[in-house]
Image: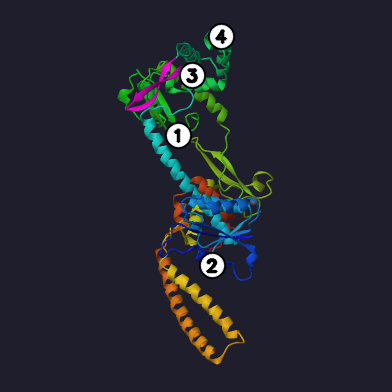
Amino acid sequence: MIALYARQSVERENSVSIQTQLAYCRTALGPDVPEEELVCYTDEGWSGGTTNRPAFAKLMADIAQGRIQKVVTYKLDRISRSLSDFVGILAQFQAHYVEFVSSQECFDTASLYGDLILKILMVFAEFERTSIINRVRDAYAKRTDMGLYMGGRRPYGFCLQDTVEGGIPTKAYVPIPEEAAVVQFLFAQYAQPNMTLYKLLDRLSENTAVSGTSRSWSTAKLRAILINPLYAAADAALYQYFDSHRVRMVDGPAVYDGTRAARLYGRSTHDRTLPDWSDMKLVLLRHAGLVPSAVWLACQHKLAANKQAGNSLSNQTSRLAGLVVCGRCGRTMTTIKSRRKDETCRRFFQCTGHTHAQSCPGIGLPIYAEDLEALANRHIAARLHGMGELLVPQMPTTSDPAAPLRTRMQEIQCQQRQLGELLLSPAMSPELLAIANRQAASLAEDRYRVEAALREHARQDAAHAPRFRLASLWDTASFDQRKAVARLLLAGVVIQPGGGCTFLWQTSVAPP
Ligand SMILES: [Zn+2]
């Protein structure tokens, strides 16, 4: 079955009626589609801001049951006004092999170009979701700057007590004496020169009086405690330690007088192997530290040294991996890491025929991954630029000034058809024929005038309609979004001997 979907939020003088929308959908399909193939879904009085509409829900249910092959609407915004909802719905259509056609925007997912645009839209719809995440993150930042409790499990050694901070109800950390003693034991032991996490684990199990009754310990749990500044008396040395790692310090150094403990907030609080800690921040809390700052810092240096030894072999590949081909022998080129004198690493592409089999002399000069990625970025930006502008799918069209013209046009077409049938009927008398002919001439004149007016409307619409440029979205895209778009557009990069690059594009992507 082919679904025709129409929606009208409120009845207005110049909004496009449900019947007119359906007529447009019918026209978009062409005359060859039999009427019994069609099924209409209409939501009257429903806004495009919600996807929770009765007929639309029925349509989605029928799609889920595999009863629909194609969905046709008058305009994209009949489906949804929100880009992310729209893209989500298109993804559901795709999952059930449902084609989607919009009669006004020439958006047809069955075509290669429509399919590509859909995929790119999906990548960029992330933007809407990301902006929601950002709003949540801003609120989070405000609360954490005040050192407020953000939920989660209680840290070992403390219980959480209701309190009020700056007029906002929150929780305070209050030491549990037995657990606090275990924490102090752990730090004091681990700070010893020959102590390891495994030895510390043994110490704990030997010493049940210290380790408590039921808690099961592991090196990961020990590490999580030892790395947490919540236990340290925050003084100038601790300030200096976090400040030198580029952690954002919410309180000034003067307040770090050793009477209070601090809390680390941020995404990577548990992964401090990364050299850059600038996405974390340290906030002073009300409670006193359990461990002197010098002991706490000694433990950090040991933990950091251990972690370094375990992590040196982690490798990083290029986002162009798998796409780069040697122009001399046609084999794939992979990234290789080279360590320079100053201990920094650079990745460069090398022909696998050269590195593995020695069967290819290679390109002859290093192709640095970051240079090639930057070049690919510029080519993709130019490519998206060439695709020009797309109409914004969520364009609001509650008022369509051309609607009366469109309705008039449909009437004219209908009358012309009826008149044609009448003229062909054998019962036509000469008098009637004369009247019919006059009427036909006047209709043709009318039609010409309405068509011209509609063309002018279309021209003005095109001039004023909101549009977006894929190229400008690309400018602000995140690394992952760029990677996804690069994978969609690029078929390969051939590196010529001497270092020249040829970019090969996916064939369906030729700008129209
Ligand atoms: Zn080669």
Residue type, mark 3 in image: Tyr
First along the sequence among labels 4 and 1: 4
Residue 158 colored in magenta in the image: yes
Residue 208, numbered label: 4
Q: Nearer the viewer, residue 471 or 499?
A: 471
Q: Which residue is mark 2?
A: 23
Mark 4 Cα within 10 Å, few/some/many (few <14, many 20+)?
few
Give the camera-side residue of 264 and 376.
Answer: 264
* Residue under pointer 3: 156
Q: Which mark is residue 276?
A: 1
Task: Give the distance between the C-alpha atoms of the residues marked 4 and 3, in whole angstroms.
Answer: 17 Å
Does 254 sit above or below residue 37? above
Residue that protrudes farthest toward the bottom in the picture: 430
Sequence-wise, the earlier of marks 1 and 2 is: 2
Way the structure is coloured: rainbow
Alpha carbon distance from label 3 to label 2: 68 Å
Regarding mark 4 in the picture, which secondary structure is present there? helix
Q: Is residue 142 above or below residue 216?
A: below
